[in-house]
Image (cartoon, grey):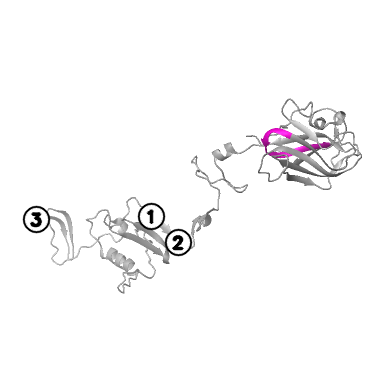
Amino acid sequence: MSYGVNKFGDHKATVNTASDELNMHGHKIVGLPTHIGALTGDGDAVSHRILLDVMEKLHNILLRTNGTNRMTGDMLMDSSNNDSIIVGCVDFGAEEKSFTLHLGNYYNGLLYNTLVQNQPVTLYTSNGFLVKADNRDTVKFNRNKIDLLIDTDANGKYIYNLPPPLHNYDACTKEYVDAAPKKCHVGLIPALNRNVDKSGYEASASSQQGSSYAAYKAFRSGNTEWTTAGITTNFWIKIKCLQAVKVWKFVLTGRRNDNPEQIHNWRFEGSNDDSDWMVLHSENSFTVNSAAHQFNVENNTNSYQYYRIFVLEASGPNPGLSHVQLFVYSD
């Protein structure tokens, strides 16, 4: 056994090469790195300073077993020397057990279960989980919802499996949008030439002042009118559509040329049997004069084949309308 030695001193030796084990005969090896980050391999010798640092860090973890193998107290890991520190357990064998890192109590923690293959790490909390970035709240996970506290960028990814929306601000799917009825802004009723028109629409009224003021006159363009024959209370004008439709808006125009014979207490109603009528809109002090008036039908969820204006009170002697039009949802 031989060694190449360059220099001998009173208390140390500097060794260049060695072909076998080195017996120090009780003498020290000095000059080893004192910083754990300077170690480059598993076979590097460890200095007394590094060993003390490791022991000090382990000492900061207070273990109180009391027969339960529980860890209590604060775990402090010093990284002031820019050391890379790993906290956790990586030596579990496959299909052995689970590992849990508790956060303050048994109701908050991180869990990994090795008994289930491909099991994700589970974060469980008692009062939710808050994510911060740059000391700013970004996302909060609650018991039954997620609060997004900043703008969300989907980065071209899909959001799917949404329920039907309940509120105006709810997100919805393309399928829902495609199937949702659209508001048609073109009037439904064509210009009629008679009460029972060849288009299939049928106009009628509880009272009309002869053929010159027949009911269909309110459903055509031009200077025509429908008026009653001296009736000023409890009368109506009605249209039968080709099929049941859902109205979202209707337009009424009173008698032409500011005629004072106008309706002012009335209801807009719908029916599917021409017998039972549902009030969709009502006005008790709105005078329908010679201007065109638009009225929205709020919260109408049903379709009807018959629609009518039922007038409770009007100014006489021959009140009426010069234009009635319906606007419906498309299929």
Q: CA distance from mark 3 to mark 1?
A: 55 Å
Circle 1: residue type: Val
Residue 250 in magenta?
yes
* Residue at the limit of the structure toward the left, as seen here: 1
- Judged from the image, the secondary structure of the residue bearing numbered disc 2 is loop
Circle 2: residue type: Thr
Residue at which label 1 appears: 121
Report x, y in % for residue 216: 80, 30
Residue 115 in which image quadrant: bottom left
Report x, y in % for residue 188: 71, 32
Q: Considering depth in this image, is 320 or 256 the residue closer to the camera?
A: 320
Residue 288 in magenta?
no
Rendered view: 61 above or below 257 = below
Q: Considering depth in this image, is 313 or 331 the residue closer to the camera?
A: 313
Q: Which comes before the other along the chain, label 2 or label 3?
A: 3
- Judged from the image, the secondary structure of the residue bearing numbered disc 1 is loop
**Magenta residues, as a range?**
240-253
Report x, y in % for residue 256: 87, 33
Majority secondary structure of magenta residues = strand
Tell me if I can see residue 84 in this picture.
Answer: no
Q: Considering depth in this image, is 126 or 311 the residue closer to the camera?
A: 311
- Judged from the image, the secondary structure of the residue bearing numbered disc 3 is loop
Which residue is at a point 45% across and 61% down the rendered structure image? 125
